[in-house]
Image (cartoon, helix red, strand yellow):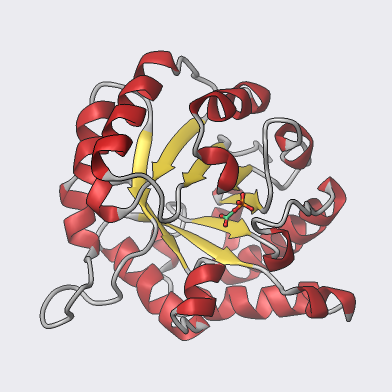
Amino acid sequence: MTKPTPLLALNWKMNKTPSEARAWAAELAERFAGEAAELAVMAPAIDLPGVADALRGSRVAYGAQDVSAFESGAYTGEISAAMLRDVGATYAIVGHSERRAYHAETDEKVAAKTRAAMHAGLVPIVCVGEELPVREAGEHVAFTLTSLRGSLADVNVEDASALVIAYEPVWAIGTGKTATAGDAEEMAAAIRGELRTLLGDVADGVRVLYGGSVKPGNIAEMCGKANVNGALVGGASLELDSVLGMAGALGV
Ligand code: PGA
């Protein structure tokens, strides 16, 4: 199996105003010279037009941190996949653990968002991962695969090559506690196996990312195993030097 092109996805979360984001992206476009893999900035939706302007002509992609499950209409405050496509977004994070925790997003809701994103031609980065008690009980694989199945319910196999999965153990997000590379590979291999059952051969081309306290010093190790195809990075994605360090370490 040829490994899919690695993806380094930067999850800024609720950081950077539109003017800060534009200036940051302009500097990134100037300094980023990578070729071997893909780099994508997942910005707050209001930052995207400025980020798009600043990244025009560069090899850096961008996307949103969430997307509505609905196509259009009376959904106050929501942002549709078509709106994101209109500003040139390639990706949307779907089902991040912070959205699951603070906005009561269930697997069912996440699946509806995944389908809406794919339908509009956006690539969803679907996040799954267990909390600490689940891991301590040794149920992390079963739990995560159940959540994966739920989050991909009724996904169309033909569209599935444009799909990214991020395994993010909740206990490792923003805590400084990283899973080991072995933990990441164990779950990524299990996820790929499940994807094969759900999607057939397309599964081999689906990128499975690891996320949770990734930084320049550990990214190469965390993404070095057979089934891990890059990283979704929060805290360490805010500083340009740290991003360029991670890109370099990943061979991006
Ligand atoms: P972190 O966040 O890198 O700050 O742990 C990762 C994420 O939430 O996507």
Q: Pick the quarter of the image with the N terminus.
A: top right
Residue 39 located left or right of residue 137:
left
Frontmost residue, 182 versus 173: 173
Frontmost residue, 230 versus 243: 243
Q: Is residue 136 in view from this perspective?
A: yes
- Quarter residue 51 falls in: top left
Residue 37 located left or right of residue 87:
right
Which residue: 78% across, 51% down?
Answer: 178
Which residue is outermost to the left? Answer: 73
The tally of labels here is: 0
- Quarter residue 54 falls in: top left
Which residue: 28% across, 65% down?
Answer: 119
Residue 69: percent from left, percent from top: 30, 75
Q: Is residue 246 above or below residue 14?
A: above
Residue 38: percent from left, percent from top: 48, 32
Which residue: 59% across, 40% down?
Answer: 236
- Quarter residue 103 falls in: bottom left
Residue 115 located left or right of residue 251:
left
Q: Is residue 215 above or below residue 162?
A: above
Q: Is residue 8 in view from this perspective?
A: no
Q: Is residue 180 above or below residue 76?
A: above
Q: Pick the quarter of the image with the C terminus.
A: top right
Residue 226: percent from left, percent from top: 76, 42
Which residue: 51% across, 81% down?
Answer: 107
Residue 224: percent from left, percent from top: 76, 36
